[in-house]
Image (cartoon, helix red, strand yellow):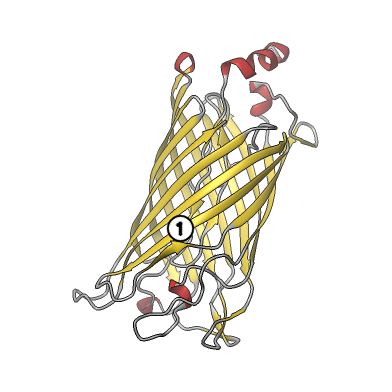
Amino acid sequence: MNRRLARTALPLTILLASLLAAVGASAHHGVASLGVAGVAGPGAPLETSSSQTLPRGAWLAYVKIDQPTFETFTPERDGEGDRSTFMMFGLGYGVRPWLSAYAFLPFHAKTAEDNAYNTAGFADASVAAVLGLRWDGRLRPVPANESLDDLEDLHVTLSAGASLPTGEENLRDRDGAIDPGLSLGFGGPSWNCGLTATKVLAPRWTAVAEASVVGFTEHRYADGARVRFGRETRLNTALVARVLTRPAARTRLDVNAEANYLVLGRDEADGVGEEATGGRILYGVGGLRLTRGPASLGLGWKTPVWTDLNEDALQQGAEGKEQGRLIATLSCLF
């Protein structure tokens, strides 16, 4: 394709749409993964962060729902974790073609099977910045205008972010006890950083890889307990296939297949590792993403295919013990 012609035609023929999926990472942790895709060019997965940044001066608004349903150990309705609903509201802005900024506000609802201790409300807000680079003989910042040929180059991002202690961390059950895992906030800031790589393998195929880490600070709760949640490390891969394109209608349909590997460190209480926390999980994710004009709708199903949890038999209601997670996201670029 003639690059000059493509650069001229691209702003008129392609309206960028995005999928910005916020992962409810566990019963008490949540992170956001980032990605942008257009009607043509590389695809973006549902759960794995891709490497496309927002256009300069563009805004992104989105909402995402992640609803896990947990396996229960006993048939009795005895307070085991039943289900959760994680919603993430996000707003992104293209500061530069190579720099995007995001703000997130999550909403968590956690339900016990006998409704003995349910919690719901807004959790800790967070912010993130993403630096976009392109390999074209050497790493360069993403330029303002990229042709379709340019979009097929290897793209990488570096990201960093932090949460703010805006959620209520001292929620109490009917007996007055505080369960940090069911509270809405961590009580202190957390931090995260990540690296992604995205490469178009063929005109309709995109491969994505991601590595990221989330760390938590220790917090003293109102009952005097000092708690630090375990560090989260993620290694994700994804393959995206564009199965339908209608340029005249500005419509695109992608099929996504992903493998998400998660390592959870042990939570600590008063400096001592807590039993029945932490472990390793491999998730499989399958889904669809429909892009039409500036809007994008993603639907997927996420399920653990392999686990190695610490004190596995005691971790009911925890990450890795889901029957599955329904994922839905809607976003719009403007």
Residue at 53 percent of width and 43 percent of height: 20
Residue 47 point in image, percent of width and height: 49, 48
- Residue 77: image quadrant is bottom left
How many numbered discs, if any?
1
Please give left or right for residue 131 compared with residue 209 in the image.
Answer: right
Residue 329 point in image, percent of width and height: 44, 43
Please give left or right for residue 275 compared with residue 78 in the image.
Answer: right
Residue at 65 percent of width and 40 percent of height: 93
Residue at 50 percent of width and 42 percent of height: 62
Q: Which residue, as the protein is rendered here, is positioned at the far left? A: 75
Height in image: 40 above or below 121? above
Report the residue marked by disc 1.
Answer: 107
Q: Where the C terminus falls, by quadrant?
A: top right
Height in image: 42 above or below 27? above
Residue at 73 percent of width and 34 percent of height: 142
- Residue 215: image quadrant is bottom right
Residue 234 point in image, percent of width and height: 56, 58
Could you say whether the residue bearing mark 1 is in a helix, strand or loop? strand
Q: Where the N terminus falls, by quadrant?
A: top right
Along the viewing direction, whichever of 262 and 89 lies nearer the viewer: 89
Q: Residues within 10 Å of mark 1 (few under 14, many from 20)?
A: some
Residue 256 point in image, percent of width and height: 44, 39
Q: Amino acid at mark 1?
A: Phe
